[in-house]
């Protein structure tokens, strides 16, 4: 069959075409603005001549609208910012005058000598000033005031900073249609999603627009007013995350109130009758003990109190008159049964609440899934197709026999991922050559040799720091890759998997129900399927519900399971090495003898770790973003749990747990809580690197494409967000016995994270694939139960260690020699003397290890009074420990049951018994009637490119099948398609790219094949 043919004929323009932000890419895109009608053009020019630049920053930012909401300037302003009905009628202003060519309009604007006014409306999307982000308003103000802010104004070529900001706000940030706009631009009722139809009477109903939407007026989501149900538009997992965050904050707040009796007790003279004036703010409700005294300890040794990082001045002393008379520091703070009862009640409340939250979360998943009809609800994936089944028509004919199922689209994925990766590398090298071009030289991709001759050398600092090369080296690599591409095209490609999308959800469920088999049946072939339902009469297909189209990682679909397992093992080995390195750094920081050093080190490590883990995780060839995020989640959770809570507990000596000195463990815990409360939310809110990209590096880019890349924004990662949540919970649970006020810190941190993460999602993060519920399910099934188990165990061990002084009564020793001792010498840095008083009523003490986690005979579990080697507990404390010790056993048993059940469900039952079982009610809405009916279009979503790179011919596929659009050019997809990178690819007679075919259905004509895209 014929190869792909690039679009050459211009279609009738129905909407305006905005200025090309990448005009240096193609001669087809020379116009700055090709879509303003004459009336709007004249009026905007007239306004520009009349207005003068404001000298006041407040004037530049625009006057606030009437009765503005708190976040209105940031979320796009009011629904009618100008007060003019016709300006907000929903029709997209800027439609070309049918009597005047777009090129002529562009020429007229190019010839205008009107000075840019920062107060004027956006010339690309006609956004008013109060519909823009604060960052863009500031950029406009600074650009008109300071020439050094925007050097791009002095460069030759069509490079505009405001165009990059338009790209950021419309092609990077998420937007939604205005309700009045959606109604007035002929979005028929049938095209709205099921969630819209079921909530038409609800306030603030939002329909998400595709990236780069230009036909209908849109605005940014409000990060304050957007409800959680609308966040499901970003993926089921995102909506669940914010709901979970809110519920956990409420649970921690209530747990904090339940802990108030213990907080009051720790701050009372009943617990500590010493001088608590030295206790720092925020630790008055913690289990710090300042009521201490020096007691005779005849058998104590200095080595018993000498720790690698702990000053011996705290616990050991000798009499000044006789060094053989030894004293040790005793804590006079004890715990009672009542405090244990409150702590245990808090534990039970948290466990029961989270269990209820998990059950409600499952039901909420179903409701959210039903309310947000997406492509996966209408699609199936065939994981074992015959290697030569490349014809979509054959798949359409096969699936049409299932109760008259109507196939809308078929995507046949071939094992050509190495070819795709090679083409992506080639693009990156060509872009590097383009970056080295001298100013004013127009790039011609078809004449790379001449382009290299017009290039400058890379800066020296880039060569040494970034390992940059010169243009000739890049060209040599390009030619080498082209040879590799030719070799790869000679190989025969077989079918890897097939995606099939149906017109109705009932069609999808019918196919899945008929063809679904368990793992055992697939292995042994025990299930009897009629020949009519076997592909080609002999192949039993393995089908499953696929991931969302944006979540599929197309260039990893051919990765073998054995290679993937090796990659995962190596990645986890590296992570554990990193954990060890982090623990060593925390230990070194602890040797400084200050809680501040330890806290700073832990906080710094927690900021660096995600980047390391992301780099390691990207080396794994995951087939879907959900799997990649879950793997990253596990790695970072292990790292942060261990380094934040466990390592801190290990490196601090047992006797420093409730010590009132500057080296107490409780001080470090409080410092970590404050750091978690402030540091990470502040960094996310400030988005320092993003601000540098947009306000410094972006204006200094040498092309519009590279400038736009500075505005793309980071991806919103559920793995990173969930890790922060579980880290805060784990830290709170781990030290709840010593610092019950941590529940209030946790509630505050989770609340702050809720709003900061929402702001990050809607204001700083760029295009992000739809995220499913894999991480939420993993948290419910494994991490939350594990956290509960550790919570219960550490609660019991914490109560077993009181009073944390490692001293027990010694009835075999006499204190007669100690009666005349008046002063003692405390060695250390600095050394000091202290007055003591010993009476005949005092007792002698001996060293005894009170830490049941590090007993001389191994770990004692459960921690019960009977495991005391020497008695140190009070009777009330022993009763408390029995409650907590056996309670921890109960929680562990419950956790084991949950783990085993999940293991059974996900392995044994899934392999032997389980087949497909639908959840929730099926929708009666047709796939093509959905507002956003995206298809499984093969592409590579590389963050170093403005838009995803397509890997198939979509010349006949409707644009509505893609979830993004490049509004800078008239034909927005050819420029971003890998199949046009080399002429030989389009003329090859072999099938080397993925194959897509769609059938569009109309009510009058039924099924009509209108898009055939079998690429050879």
Image: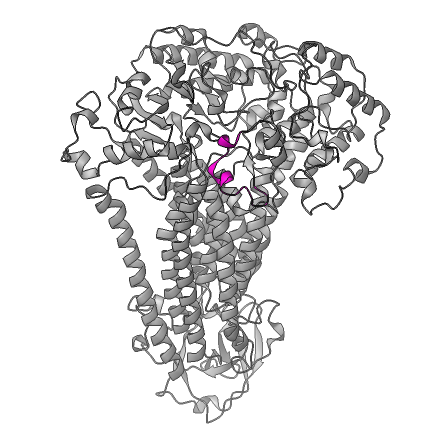
Q: Position of residue 682 (x, y in %)?
A: 61, 48
Q: Residue at x 43, y 15 (%)?
A: 953
The C terminus - image quarter = top left
Instruction: Point out the stretch of residues depicted in magenta.
Output: 188-205
Residue 82 visible in the shown view? yes
- Quadrant housing residue 613: top left
Residue in the image at 19% along x and 34% along y = 522
Q: List x then y, in percent, for residue 1000.
A: 42, 20
Q: Is residue 290 above or below residue 411?
A: below
**Relative height, residue 696 to residue 843 (above, below):** above
Q: Is residue 416 found left or right of 467 in the rendered image?
A: left
**What secondary structure predominates along the stretch shown in magenta?**
loop
Q: Position of residue 769 (x, y in %)?
A: 47, 34
Residue at the farthest front position = 1004
Is 1014 situated left or right of 454 in this image? left
Residue sitting nearer the eye, 889 or 299: 889
Quarter of the image holding residue 177?
A: top right
The answer to which of 757 and 530 lies nearer the viewer is 530
110 inside magenta stretch: no
The quadrant of the image that shows the N terminus is top left
């Amino acid at each position: 069959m014929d190869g792909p043919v690039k679009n050459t004929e211009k279609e009738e323009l129905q909407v305006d075409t905005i200025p090309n932000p990448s005009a240096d890419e193609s001669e087809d895109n020379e116009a700055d603005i090709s879509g303003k009608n004459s009336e709007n053009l004249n009026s905007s020019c007239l306004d520009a001549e009349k207005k003068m630049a404001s000298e006041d920053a407040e004037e530049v930012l625009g006057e606030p609208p009437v009765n503005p909401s708190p976040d209105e300037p940031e979320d796009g302003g009011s629904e009618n910012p100008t007060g003019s009905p016709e300006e907000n009628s929903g029709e997209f202003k800027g439609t070309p005058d049918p009597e005047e060519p777009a090129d002529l309009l562009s020429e007229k604007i190019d010839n205008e000598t009107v000075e840019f006014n920062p107060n004027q409306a956006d010339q690309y999307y006609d956004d008013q000033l109060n519909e823009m982000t604060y960052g863009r308003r500031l950029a406009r103000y600074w650009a008109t005031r300071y020439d050094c802010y925007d050097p791009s104004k002095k460069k030759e070529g069509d490079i505009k900073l405001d165009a990059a900001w338009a790209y950021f706000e419309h092609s990077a940030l998420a937007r939604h249609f205005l309700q009045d706009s959606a109604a007035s631009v002929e979005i028929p009722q049938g095209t709205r999603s099921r969630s819209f139809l079921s909530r038409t009477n609800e306030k603030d109903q939002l329909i998400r627009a595709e990236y780069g939407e230009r036909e209908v007026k849109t605005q940014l989501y409000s990060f304050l007013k957007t409800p959680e149900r609308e966040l499901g538009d970003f993926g089921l997992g995102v909506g669940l995350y914010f709901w979970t965050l809110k519920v956990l904050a409420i649970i921690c707040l209530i747990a904090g109130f339940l802990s108030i009796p213990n907080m009051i007790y720790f701050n009372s003279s009943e617990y500590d009758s010493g001088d608590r004036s030295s206790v720092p703010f925020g630790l008055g409700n913690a289990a710090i003990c300042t009521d201490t005294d020096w007691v005779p300890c005849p058998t104590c040794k200095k080595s018993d109190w000498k720790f690698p990082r702990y000053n011996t001045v705290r616990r050991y002393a000798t009499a000044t008159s006789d060094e053989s008379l030894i004293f040790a520091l005793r804590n006079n703070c004890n715990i009672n049964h009542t405090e244990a009862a409150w702590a245990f009640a808090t534990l039970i409340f948290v466990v029961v609440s989270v269990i209820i939250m998990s059950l409600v979360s499952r039901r909420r998943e179903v409701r959210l899934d039903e309310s947000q009809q997406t492509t996966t609800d209408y699609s199936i994936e065939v994981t074992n197709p015959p290697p030569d089944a490349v014809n979509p028509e054959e798949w359409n004919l096969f699936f049409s026999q299932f109760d008259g199922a109507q196939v809308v689209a078929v995507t046949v994925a071939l094992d050509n991922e190495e070819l795709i990766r090679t083409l992506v590398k080639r693009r990156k090298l060509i872009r590097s050559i383009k970056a080295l071009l001298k100013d004013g030289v127009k790039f011609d991709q078809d004449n790379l040799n001449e382009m290299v001759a017009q290039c400058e050398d890379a800066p020296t600092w880039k060569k040494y720091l970034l390992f940059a090369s010169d243009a000739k080296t890049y060209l040599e690599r390009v030619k080498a890759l082209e040879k590799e591409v030719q070799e790869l095209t000679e190989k025969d490609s077989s079918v890897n998997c097939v995606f099939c999308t149906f017109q109705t959800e009932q069609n999808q469920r019918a196919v899945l129900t008929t063809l679904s088999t368990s793992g055992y049946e697939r292995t042994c072939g025990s299930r009897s399927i009629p020949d009519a339902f076997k592909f080609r009469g002999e192949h039993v297909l393995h089908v499953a519900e696929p991931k969302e189209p944006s979540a599929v990682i197309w260039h990893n679909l051919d990765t073998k399971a054995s290679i993937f397992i090796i990659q995962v093992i190596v990645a986890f080995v590296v992570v554990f090495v990193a954990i060890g390195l982090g623990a060593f750094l925390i230990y070194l920081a602890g040797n400084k003898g200050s809680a501040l050093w330890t806290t700073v080190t832990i906080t710094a490590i927690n900021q660096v770790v995600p980047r390391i883990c992301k780099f390691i995780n990207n080396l794994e060839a995951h087939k879907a973003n959900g799997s990649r995020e879950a793997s990253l989640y596990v790695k970072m959770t292990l790292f942060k749990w261990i380094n934040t809570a466990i390592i801190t507990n290990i490196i601090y000596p047992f006797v420093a747990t409730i010590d009132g000195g500057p080296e107490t463990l409780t001080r470090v815990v409080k410092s970590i809580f404050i750091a978690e409360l402030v540091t990470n939310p502040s960094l996310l809110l400030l988005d320092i690197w993003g601000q540098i990209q947009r306000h410094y590096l972006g204006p200094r880019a040498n092309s519009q494409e590279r400038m736009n890349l500075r505005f793309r924004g980071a991806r919103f990662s559920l793995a990173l967000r969930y890790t922060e949540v579980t880290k805060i919970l784990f830290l709170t649970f781990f030290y709840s016995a010593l610092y019950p006020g941590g529940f209030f810190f946790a509630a505050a941190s989770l609340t702050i994270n809720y709003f900061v993460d929402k702001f990050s999602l809607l204001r700083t993060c760029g295009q992000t694939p739809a995220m499913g519920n894999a991480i939420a399910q993993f948290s419910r099934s494994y991490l939350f139960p594990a956290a509960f188990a550790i919570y219960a165990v550490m609660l019991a061990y914490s109560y077993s260690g009181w009073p944390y002084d490692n001293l027990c009564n010694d009835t075999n020793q006499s204190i007669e020699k100690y009666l005349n001792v008046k002063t003692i010498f405390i060695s250390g840095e600095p050394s000091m003397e202290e007055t003591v008083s010993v009476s005949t009523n005092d007792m002698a003490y001996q060293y005894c290890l009170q830490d049941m986690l590090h007993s001389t005979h191994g770990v004692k579990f459960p921690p019960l009074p009977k495991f005391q080697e020497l008695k140190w507990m009070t009777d009330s404390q022993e009763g408390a420990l029995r409650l907590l010790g056996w309670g921890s056993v109960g929680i562990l048993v419950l956790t084991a049951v949950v783990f085993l059940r999940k293991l059974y469900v996900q392995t044994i039952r899934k392999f032997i018994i389980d087949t497909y079982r639908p959840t929730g009610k099926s929708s009666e809405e047709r796939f093509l009637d959905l507002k956003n009916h995206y298809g499984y279009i093969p592409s590579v979503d590389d963050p170093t490119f403005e838009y995803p790179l397509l890997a198939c011919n979509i010349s006949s596929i409707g644009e509505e099948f893609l979830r993004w659009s490049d509004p800078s050019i008239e034909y927005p997809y050819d420029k971003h398609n890998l199949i046009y990178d080399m002429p030989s690819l389009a003329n090859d007679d072999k099938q080397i790219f993925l194959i897509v075919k769609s059938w569009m259905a109309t009510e009058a004509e039924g099924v009509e094949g209108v898009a055939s895209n079998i690429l050879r």
